[in-house]
Image (tube, rainbow, N blue to C red):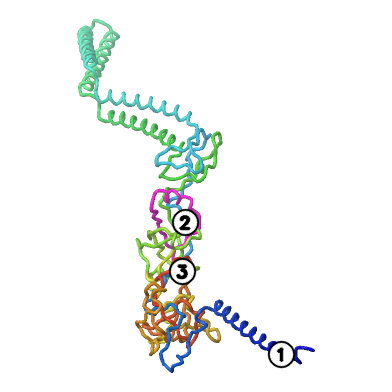
Amino acid sequence: MNASSHPIKRRSFWKARTIGAIAFVAVLGTVLSAALGPGVVGLDPAPAGDGSTAVETPRLHVRVAQAQSIEGPELFHRYRGEVIARRDSSLAMRRGGRLQEVAVHEGDLVKRGDVLARIDVADLYAAAASADAEIAAAEAALEEATAGPRYQTIRAAEARVQQLEAQWTAAKNRFERQRSLRSRGAGTQQEYDDAKFASDALAANQMSAKAELDELKEGTRQEQIAAARARLQLAKAARQRVDVDLSDSQIVAPFDGVIAARLFDEGSIIGPNQPVLRILESPPVHATFGVPADVSDFLKLNDRLRVSVGEDGPDNSQPARVIRMQPQINLVTRTRVIEVELQTDNSDTATESISWIGKTATLWVPWSQTQTQQDGWIAQSDGADRIPIWVPTSALVRGVRGLWSVYVAEPELHSDSNAKSIDTALGGIDTNVVTISRRDVKVIRTAGQMSLVSGSIAGTEAIVVEGTQRVGPGVSAVAVWDTPASSLSSQETAAR
């Protein structure tokens, strides 16, 4: 006999199946409660069996914040540029020759005035010695001309004049005797002529000696002194030319910096003005950027901005100061080139900044500084009653037809605003029972974890900022008042 034919066994069979079904439902309820949270089960408890209208506080809670209290992140214009050295020089010598010494290598730090390289200058040393001798001779001649004749020379000239006067007097007497004899018919014409010519010659010599004596007594003429001084200056100029050649035969650091390139080694033959070394000036380093005209109009010299190197964001940026602005707009790119000076915080960063040269840099210009935050995307609001507000991006809920929505917590009329039912669990935060409603919004822009939206939301309304995945329109919940951070520090908060 089977179980279906026996009445007792049939009742036991159905009783067992009923107990199993009840156990299955209980287990399923427990699993769903654990998976979906306590807010799913018992969100809106049934009224008490005694007909009382009292409403129990829901076990689901969400965090809310007043719309006008949510502060948005700081936004930036972002522009790419390049880090450059304040001065970048290729160093060469004006004279060619054989390199005798190159005292530095790549990466060496040098000070202004350090001798970095030189060529062989043996020929210049010989020329310098010859020029020194010429200067000595010219100086001696000038001193002699300035001092005038010596006393002994003047005495000798006076004696010569006296000697010639005595000889002229004797010759003149002989001539007078010959003329007397000739008048009486005695003596010859030849003797007369010889006496006359001898007297005239001695008279001329005596006059010349007297003139030389007068010249010695008057001293050296000013023209002779000027000529001697000019010869000395010419000798000194020749020596200066040698000094210039010696200076042009070596390389001296024009400023404090670091050696970027060494192009030749000792023994190489180089030509005039051929680069041997390349030097970059020590920090602070500079950076150049092309900025649109409408943004650059708000910038001026000495403005303080932030510059990051490589892929760093504004959090890892360095302070910078605008030091130069190109006066005209580039007709091709429609940008204005500005140059900033990076101001490192300490000596270690200053030394490290040398390695930044040539890297890509990013200029961060705050929106508020250029007043651009008040035009463009702010102007996209739909009217005076729809003021754009910032909300956490996680608070956005997908709406219909690709739109977005936010949940607004509206207080229930029968809720007790001073309820403290879950104060202990939430650390003493004031709570109240609210009903969730959906508001459609338009996303104006997104900046990382914050979004700017526009919709029919009043500034005093409470927006659900956490727990949107567990609630929906019409759901009752406990609102936990909280205010999210005013700004989320991240590179993603930077916006163009």
Foreground of the two, 24 or 237: 24
Where is residue 482, by image quadrant? bottom left
Foreground of the two, 115 or 366: 366
Q: Residues within 10 Å of mark 2 (few under 14, many from 20)?
A: many
Q: Residues within 10 Å of mark 3 (few under 14, many from 20)?
A: many
Three-letter amino acid code at the position of disc 3: Thr
Residue 416 horizontal side relative to residue 96, left or right: left
- Image position, residue 242 (x, y; %): 42, 33
- Give the SS element for disc 3: helix
Residue 32 horizontal side relative to residue 379, left or right: right
Tell me the quadrant of the picture where the N terminus can be found.
bottom right
- Give the SS element for disc 2: strand
Three-letter amino acid code at the position of disc 1: Arg
Q: Residue at x 45, y 30 (%)?
A: 124
User: Which residue is label 1 attached to?
Assistant: 10
Residue 328 horizontal side relative to residue 165, left or right: right
User: Which residue is label 2 attached to?
Assistant: 83
> Label 2 to label 1, Cα distance in Å?
91 Å
> Label 3 to label 2, Cα distance in Å?
23 Å
> Which one is closest to the eye, mark 3 or mark 1?
1
User: Which residue is label 3 attached to?
Assistant: 493
- Image position, residue 33 (x, y; %): 55, 79
Residue 345 shown in magenta: yes
* Magenta region: 334-362
- Give the SS element for disc 1: helix
